[in-house]
Image (spheres, rainbow, N blue to C red):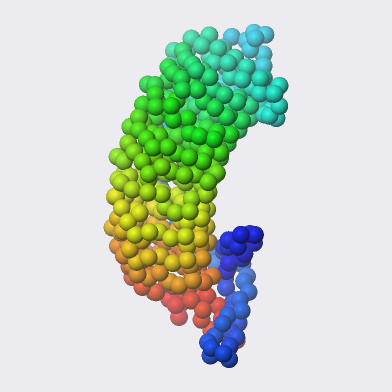
């Protein structure tokens, strides 16, 4: 059952079972439903909904597994109290207090530093000095194997200047919640052949630092989530021939130029545009032939226009939750009909079962949506019974059925 909590009328859907009382209208001789809801007791169904996109994300996980393993190694090593590689001195006293260090299995150092991040000018200066001091300290250590992860959080570094990391070999950089507003074009000079993962989430960037990124030819993952980016220009990542994961979630109303993703057609596998204020599926996505997972949740998309998914030859998972979809055109999934295996349409405004559109998806195995408040999901344990062309032929559709003197949404497979 949907509850309309937002001022803009957008519905929030939860795991509810719909309980409906029929009311006959004398003017139309039709039956309307006065519905109340109670929390769904079917825990199995709830688990199915939460995990509906899991199978399609297996390939995507491979993209970020190096980062996860690095983080795990880092946390494990912290427990052993690995000392930081620089020599203790009065000049490094602040770093010693704010940073934790670890070595991975390849003897590469990982450094995590946190600051107060209050946003005042004093804190900003302190944060910038902390970054300079950290880079200087790592250089002085004369590391034999380089830096696996440099992680700076809540330290109020407003601008990354040219040559911020020159002299170091760094594989992963994360600068989160630092109040970052600008990145100089030469900020990552010296890291052209080493930097693989760059995370700048939770900052104040108003545009993607495309000039600085063009030098990073080995970059595999880029996270610009939770910034203030409003425009992505043409050829923003044309030099990133190895970029596999791009996250632009939770920015302002983002406009993607039609050719903003040009150059990523054969490499990009995971694209996250959740909460980006999109009012339609961007044309920039067309022809991303390697894309496997696309997250368009929590936007303002009202329709999936025929042909807009054309050229997404590898798309297996599509998340369209919490948009403003009311209908699905029969040709809306042109281009992905024979590849899409996981689809989530929860929390939209769909009030009629989109049978023609869904039956065109010949490979669909995991789907979840709600129609008029009734949640639909695949709840088969037998893999052979999960063929969605059959399931979506109303064999597992939740519809109002009589229960005593009330109506409730139940699968007609229960009858």
> Which one is nearer the viewer's eye here, 54 or 373?
373
Say whether residue 184 is visible.
Answer: yes
Q: Is residue 100 left or right of residue 395?
A: right
Q: Residue at x 47, y 30 (%)?
A: 209
Q: Is residue 130 above or below residue 228?
A: above
> Which one is nearer the viewer's eye here, 73 or 12?
12
Say whether residue 292 is visible.
Answer: no
Q: Residue at x 43, y 60 (%)?
A: 303
Q: Is residue 1 above or below residue 157?
A: below
Picture quadrant of residue 181:
top right
The tally of labels here is: 0
Q: Is residue 134 left or right of residue 282?
A: right
Q: Residue at x 46, y 20 (%)?
A: 186
In the image, residue 333 lies at what x, y percent? 34, 59
Q: Is residue 158 left or right of residue 335?
A: right
In the picture, which quadrant includes the N terminus? bottom right
In the image, residue 277 lies at what x, y percent? 52, 49
> Which one is nearer the viewer's eye here, 30 or 112?
30
Q: Is residue 234 above or below residue 359?
A: above
In the image, residue 231 lies at what x, y percent? 48, 40
Q: Residue at x 53, y 46 (%)?
A: 253
In the picture, which quadrant includes the C terminus? bottom left
Picture quadrant of residue 361:
bottom left
């Amino acid at each position: 059952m949907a509850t309309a909590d937002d001022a803009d009328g957008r519905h929030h859907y939860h795991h509810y079972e719909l309980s409906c009382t029929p009311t006959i209208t004398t003017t139309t001789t039709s039956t309307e439903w006065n519905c109340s809801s109670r929390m769904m007791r079917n825990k199995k169904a709830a688990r199915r909904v939460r995990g509906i996109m899991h199978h399609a994300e297996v390939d995507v996980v491979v993209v970020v597994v190096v980062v996860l393993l690095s983080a795990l190694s880092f946390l494990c090593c912290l427990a052993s109290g690995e000392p930081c590689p620089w020599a203790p001195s009065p000049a490094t006293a602040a770093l010693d207090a704010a940073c934790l260090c670890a070595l991975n299995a390849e003897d590469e150092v990982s450094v995590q530093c946190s600051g107060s991040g209050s946003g005042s000018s004093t804190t900003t200066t302190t944060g910038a000095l902390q970054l300079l001091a950290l880079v200087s300290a790592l250089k002085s250590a004369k590391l034999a194997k380089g830096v696996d992860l440099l992680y700076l959080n809540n330290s109020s570094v407003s601008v990354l200047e040219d040559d911020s990391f020159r002299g170091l070999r760094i594989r992963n950089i994360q600068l989160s919640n630092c109040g970052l507003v600008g990145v100089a074009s030469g900020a990552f000079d010296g890291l052209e052949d080493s930097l693989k993962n760059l995370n700048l989430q939770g900052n104040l960037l108003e545009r993607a630092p495309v000039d600085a990124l063009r030098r990073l030819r080995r970059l595999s993952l880029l996270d610009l989530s939770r910034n203030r980016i409003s425009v992505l220009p043409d050829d923003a990542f044309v030099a990133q021939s190895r970029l596999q994961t791009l996250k632009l979630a939770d920015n302002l109303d983002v406009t993607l130029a039609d050719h903003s993703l040009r150059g990523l057609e054969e490499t990009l596998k995971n694209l996250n545009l959740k909460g980006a204020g999109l009012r339609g599926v961007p044309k920039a996505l067309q022809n991303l032939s390697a894309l496997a997972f696309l997250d368009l949740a929590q936007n303002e998309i009202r329709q999936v226009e025929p042909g807009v998914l054309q050229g997404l030859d590898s798309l297996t998972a599509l998340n369209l939750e919490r948009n403003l979809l009311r209908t699905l055109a029969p040709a809306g999934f042109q281009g992905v009909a024979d590849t899409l295996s996981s689809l989530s349409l929860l929390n939209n405004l769909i009030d009629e079962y989109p049978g023609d559109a869904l039956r065109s998806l010949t490979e669909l195995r995991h789907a979840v949506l709600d129609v008029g408040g009734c949640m639909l999901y695949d709840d088969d344990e037998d893999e052979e019974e999960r063929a969605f062309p059959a399931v979506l032929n109303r064999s597992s559709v939740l519809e109002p059925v009589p229960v005593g003197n009330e109506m409730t949404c139940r699968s007609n497979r229960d009858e």
